[in-house]
Structures are given as C-alpha cells and as structure tokens.
Image (cartoon, rainbow, N blue to C red):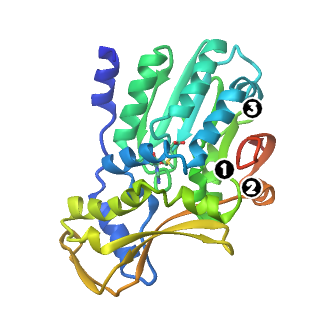
Amino acid sequence: MTTDVQTFETKSLCPLDSREALIDEVWSGLCKRPRSLVPWMLYDCEGSRLFECITTLPEYYPTRTERDIVANHAGAILAASGSDYSRPLRLLELGAGTAAKTGILLEAATRSRSQVTYFPIDVSSDALAAACESIGCLLPDVQLEPVVANYVTDPPRLEPFQGTTLAMYIGSSIGNFSPEEARTILRNLRAELRRGDALLLGTDMVKDEATLVRAYDDGEGVTAAFNLNILHRLNRELGANFDTGCFRHRARWNAAESRIEMHLESACDQTVNIPAAQLTLQFAAFETIHTENSYKFTTETLGALLDDAGFAIEQTWTDPQQWYALTLAGLR
Ligand SMILES: C[S@@+](CC[C@H](N)C(=O)[O-])C[C@H]1O[C@@H](n2cnc3c(N)ncnc32)[C@H](O)[C@@H]1O
C-alpha cells in the first residue's frame, strides 16, 4: 500500500455515526408485528467480514457467477456504456463493498480511457477502506472518491462531469428492496444521470427453490453467523442483551413475492432489553425478526422495474444457466 492511499483512507473514510439511525430502526422495526430490521444494519465491520466469507462459499453462487460474467464481458460492457474513449469515465457504485468484481471493470477501463474516476458509496466504512486499499494498490491511476453513506436515506448527488458516468449497482443488492423501494432507488439514480450515461445492474434470477435456499443457509453456518451478527451489533452498539444462542437463523423461499427471506427465530419465550433505545421487548417462542429479503427476478419483472424507473435496456449478459443477469440500461 502506498503512503498516499493510507493518508487518503484515514482522512476520507469516517464511519457513519449509526447510533441514532440504529435506535430509529429498532423502534420502527422491533415494536411492530411481524418484527423486522433493515438490511444495512447487517453491515458493520464484522458483518462486512462475514459477507466476504459468504461470497466464497460453494453454496453462494451469485458472486462467482457475476464475477465470471464481468470477467468474460468487461470490454463489451465498457464499450456499450460509452463508445467515445477520449472522454473521461466516472464509475459510481452503490453498495460497493470491497469492490472485488468492480476492480475487473476498472482495470479494463484504465486500458482504454485516459481518465477513470471511481466513486464508491457504502454504509460500511470498513468495506470501503478495503476497496480503496486494493484498487489504490492495483490501479494507482484510478482516481478514488469514496463516500460512506446510506444511499437509501441519503441518495447520491453527482457533480457536473465532462465525461461519461456509468452507475453500477451489482451484487444483487437491488434484490434487498421491495419493488417500490427498488423503483425509488433507481429513479433517484436516474435523476442524477445525463444522456449518454448508463446503469449496470446485477440481478439474481428465479431458479429452483433448493438452490436458492442453500445459498442463504450454507452448511458451515456462515450465513447464520452473518444474520445473527445484527443482534450482536445491537448488543455492542446499543447495550442490548440479546442472547444470540436463543435465536435461530431461518432462510425460506416466498414464492408469492419471489424472494428469499432471512429471519431470526426466537427459540423460547424471552425478554430483551435495549437500554440505548429505552426498550424492553418480549419474544414468544418461534416468533421471528425478518432481517433481509433477496428478491429474484424474471426477464419480465426486471424489464418492468427498469422501465418504471426511466431506463431502457440496451444489453444483457448472463451465464450459461441463466442464473444471473448483468443488464446495461440507458436513459429512456
Ligand atoms: C450484498 S453486498 C454487495 C457488495 C458488492 N457490491 C458485491 O457485489 O459483492 C451489499 C453491500 O451494500 C452495502 N449496503 C447495504 N445497504 C446499504 C445502504 N442502504 N446504503 C449504502 N450501502 C449499503 C453493504 O455494506 C454491502 O457492502
């Protein structure tokens, strides 16, 4: 790692002050029935570490499938997202995480473009620090402008730019949101883009139930640890006393909604205190906290979402089994 990158990280990647946001989410999600929490809460430092472990599991096909699509079509994706190679390229990414797959595209971009700027946004400062460290080392010519933010509550604003912007939203992250929320996120993004800019969207497609459920309930229990980390986080950051041994990870396919749901199920009747939120909660045995959705798409639902958000599909790349789609869309 170069000294420049180290200086840059310590100056720019301030963690979000999440305490007030966590308290708000706990009040709005845990006091209603059925109880729920929002997925950004899964990604503190430990959650981001566990997610990286998930991406290497044999059961978790989305990451390696998407990585292969990016690696096989990087040149074509870049060509389709702006054919004037003399113009600078700005790559904005929502929920960038450690940007492992994005590095492949950035590397290809630096071979054809004179100026490449990478503008990753993530709620996890730890994941962004890892992203900037690896890209800063491998691709020192890429200008890095990371932002630690919640892109739902604080939608990105783009400065005017004399070049082409490619907005990336990969990793199947759009699937964490209901169709209405997803449409709002994409519309907000669309409002920041100009003619000639493009969106690259990664979506996981509907497939057989057993494959889907296994991907969210692996044999080693890494996804279970990832899910339970949300309770550990409330213990660490809000002084809660969740006994994590008394909650079970559950992953189930909801066919009517076309989504995998992750829940934490209370193993017994129990009382939990969350002092920072001034809350005491009674959980009945088998009651669940719904922690994450992962919507799975068909060609039709994907097309309708993009159309509703003001995008027009230009090209789609997929894998031989058509398990995953990477879609390039322009402004409609
Ligand atoms: C499923 S991971 C995908 C990471 C990476 N894009 C990939 O393809 O491997 C979701 C990422 O989005 C981030 N994230 C989740 N909700 C977010 C939100 N509301 N605002 C900003 N980042 C968010 C998480 O911290 C995490 O890094």
Q: Describe residue 54's horizontal placement relative to residue 129 as left or right.
A: right
- Secondary structure of the residue carrying tag 1 is strand
Question: Image quadrant for the N terminus?
Answer: top left
Spatial CA span between label 3 and label 1: 22 Å
Residues at badges 2 and 1 in contact (C-beta under 8 Å)? yes
Q: Position of residue 174 (x, y in %)?
A: 60, 54
Q: Nearer the viewer, residue 15 or 130?
A: 130
Q: Circle 2 is placed at which residue position?
A: 302
Query: Type of residue at label 1?
Result: Thr
Q: Position of residue 61 (x, y in %)?
A: 60, 47
Q: In the image, what residue occupies the spot 34% across and 80% down? A: 267
Q: In the image, what residue occupies the spot 28% across and 51% down? A: 17
Nearer mark to the viewer, of 2 and 1? 1
Q: Choose top left, top right, bottom left or bottom right for residue 144.
A: top left
- Secondary structure of the residue carrying tag 2 is helix
Answer few, some or many: residues within 10 Å of disc 2's Cα (few below 14, many 20 plus, some between 14 and 19): many
